Every structure is written in C-alpha cells, then in structure tokens.
Amino acid sequence: MELLIKEETLGLDVIYIQTKKWETVVGSKEVRNFGGSLAGQKANKGILITTSSFTQDARVCTDYFA
C-alpha cells in the first residue's frame, strides 16, 4: 500500500508512506529502493512500515535520508 499526504495547503510538504508485509527482515536494499521512491514521488518525507523488522544495515542506511 502506498499513500501520499500533502501536509500543508500549498502541498509543498509531501509525505510518502509505504507499507508492506515481509516474511523476512527488511534489508538496506529495500530501504534504498524506498529512498528512490521518495524522489520519484517528489516527497520530502517518508515512512516505511513493515510487519517484519529491519536489519542493522537497513537502520544505518536511513541516516543517508535523514
């Protein structure tokens, strides 16, 4: 599931939300792909939600998007 939220009246602040059900842990590749999706959606904020957990590499990878 994917959602785009325009946080203010002018729509300058866009939040991209992606939810997925993973059977295994989420790795850095998936986090990088999500970061690319942020650019593709022209969003400046993002939330990646999973039913699983994130690897340590995936958690470190988020520092590049912060």
Image (cartoon, helix red, strand yellow):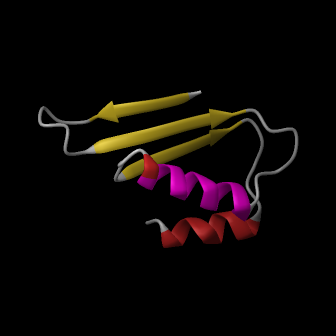
- Give the residue drawn at x 62%, y 55%: 33
Left/right of residue 18 with respect to residue 41 in the rendered view: right
| Horizontal side, residue 5 vs residue 8: left or right | right
Task: Give the left or right position of residue 3, taking residue 32 as reference.
Answer: left
Q: Name, please, the residue furthest toward the front.
A: 40
Q: Report which quarter residue 12 is drawn in.
A: top left
Residue at image position (43%, 41%) is 16
Residue 36 image point, x, y percent? 53, 57
Q: Is residue 36 magenta?
A: yes
Q: Which percent across, then down, holds residue 30?
A: 69, 54
Q: Which residue is at the front of the view, 31 or 59?
A: 31
Left or right for 16, reference 14:
right
- Residue 48 lies in magenta, yes or no? no
Magenta region: which residues?
A: 28-39
Residue at figure coordinates x 40%, y 33% from the top left: 4
Instruction: Name, please, the residue furthest toward the right.
Output: 24
Query: From this viewpoint, which residue is outermost toward the left?
Result: 10
Q: In which quarter of the image is residue 56?
A: bottom right
Residue 29 at x, y percent in the picture: 72, 61
Prevailing secondary structure class for the magenta stretch in the rendered image: helix
Which percent across, then down, holds residue 41? Answer: 41, 44
* As drawn, 39 above or below 17: below
